[in-house]
Amino acid sequence: MAGRRVNVNVGVLGHIDSGKTALARALSTTASTAAFDKQPQSRERGITLDLGFSCFSVPLPARLRSSLPEFQAAPEAEPEAGEPLLQVTLVDCPGHASLIRTIIGGAQIIDLMMLVIDVTKGMQTQSAECLVIGQIACQKLVVVLNKIDLLAEGKRQAAVDKMTKKMQKTLENTKFRGAPIIPVAAKPGGPEAPETEAPQGIPELIEVVKKVKSMQMFHMPITSAMQGDRLGICVTQFDPKLLERGLVCAPESLHTVHAALISVEKIPYFRGPLQTKAKFHITVGHETVMGRLMFFSPAPDNFDQEPILDSFDFSQEYLFQEQYLSKDLAPAVTNNDEADKKAGQATEGHCPRQQWALVEFEKPVTCPRLCLVIGSRLDADIHTNTCRLAFHGILLHGLEDRNYADSFLPRLKVYKLKHKHGLVERAMDDYSVIGRSLFKKETNIQLFVGLKVHLSTGELGIIDSAFGQSGKFKIHIPGRETALKPDPEMSEAPQLVLWPHCLPGHITSSIRPLKKPALQ
């Protein structure tokens, strides 16, 4: 029967003490050496500390038999002796808040998540975090309402119905809307109860899990393996104590990086801004390290461009952001809202469809390209009812050179718009004005020649040249139908706003009116 199994990995996640390990034990027929809290530390503390693996098998549904090699090669031929099976590998994840790194790692190797809820308590802090992780890393969900045996028998069904409605409402605004919700009692009577009392609701739960499609191998004599399989490997003359948790991969598929460019999407349940230069716990694969971020976005004119999910365009120019731009943090529109738009700041209801960040890791991480990245604030108080998961994204480009600041960053065209003030000194003629106090005298004004200047009168000018050696400059106003003549009642000169082209190092400036009598 070797090779006549279709395997699916099912993660068992939820808040601590919701009964995840008891559920895995009730479902399983075969356990690995890392199942059911067999570690001495787990038994001593009474909690799951690491991923546990076990499995059970059911007859393979007819609709899935085409996934087996013999059915693909010769659909009309007689199959080999033996009933093909659907094998469900259970990945029992810890529930304690301090083990979120392990939970995130486990979530990345599963095809379906079982979110285990203590029916007497409902959604708890780590339940919510597991649901957020599921939205990022998983496509299918089954909610398990565990410990129904603790409900008063006369009121049990009403309590289950009430909790089912609560969970349906919780899932309503997620991608898991309409997910199955199954009531069970994985260990009737609690952990100390005798094994004689059978679990409740397990057949119904198994019936729901037959509905998942996957193509993997597990726990059988095999000659090859693929991503997602769990293998036991016998190596002669080898001390297993010398082996640490790591990754098995094809050559050239993993890279050790010191920094990375990632796409970024803020998790809406995270409170507060995502600030440039802030540090977060960055989870990449099975590693979690501290990382410092710098956020950037498209130029304002490209805020609505279609997101590119699997690559990064180094030929484009990008706009530095002091923080991740989101609607809930967008500043109110001011009288100078056009200036804010040009400077790349999010105005109300207008944010870029895609944003990125440069992540600089405190220590190198080993990961594949296009892997999932999750940013968290794991140092937050676990007793507060807040989401510690801040953002997620995809690693688009890893920086393997330790000296990436010199070798790579010059390729990254991220520019910052600065706002500076200058003064209109005088009108030179009907079509030109002289400005000052915008550039230093040592500035090469030739670099700014050709940039457009908007006058407060609505007219458009262009920086024409330097004027003298003190940093003054000449602005030409082409196509004027009337001469630039000051109003006799005016005590201030016209306002000018300078918009440069979007190039690194250029600035955005406004030239303020003079606080002196009008030009003569």
Image: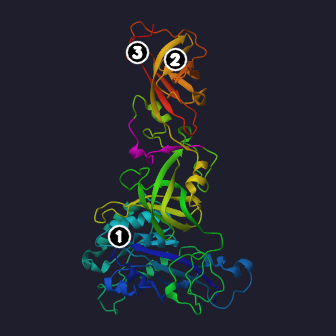
Which structural element holds mark 1?
A: helix
Residue 518: quadrant of the picture: top left
Side of 225 where 319 appears, left or right: left
Q: In this orientation, which residue lies closer to the viewer: 277 or 60?
A: 277
User: Residue at coordinates 50% horizontally, 40% vertically from top-left?
Assistant: 416
> Which of the two labelled residues, at mark 1 and mark 3, occupies the earlier sequence position?
1
User: Residue at coordinates 24% horizontally, 78% vertically from top-left?
Assistant: 152
Which structural element holds mark 3?
A: loop
Please name which of the two marks, 1 or 3, marks the residue nearer to the observer.
3
Please name which of the two marks, 1 or 2, marks the residue nearer to the observer.
2
User: Residue at coordinates 53% horizontally, 30% vertically from top-left?
Assistant: 442
Magenta segment boundaries in residue numbering: 317-332
Q: How many marks?
A: 3
Q: In this orientation, which residue lies closer to the viewer: 436 or 85?
A: 436
Q: The residue under label 1 is which amino acid type?
A: Ala
Residue 382 - label: none
Tell me if label 1 and label 3 are in contact, CB under 8 Å: no
Which residue, given by chain and number where applicable, does mark 2 sit on?
Answer: 434
Q: Is residue 178 visible?
A: no
Residue 492 - label: 3
309 to 143, vertically: above or below: above
Q: The residue under label 2 is which amino acid type?
A: Ile
> Which of the two labelled residues, at mark 2 and mark 3, occupies the earlier sequence position?
2
Q: Quadrant of the C terminus?
A: top left
Please name which of the two marks, 2 or 3, marks the residue nearer to the observer.
2
Which residue, given by chain and number where applicable, does mark 1 sit on?
Answer: 97
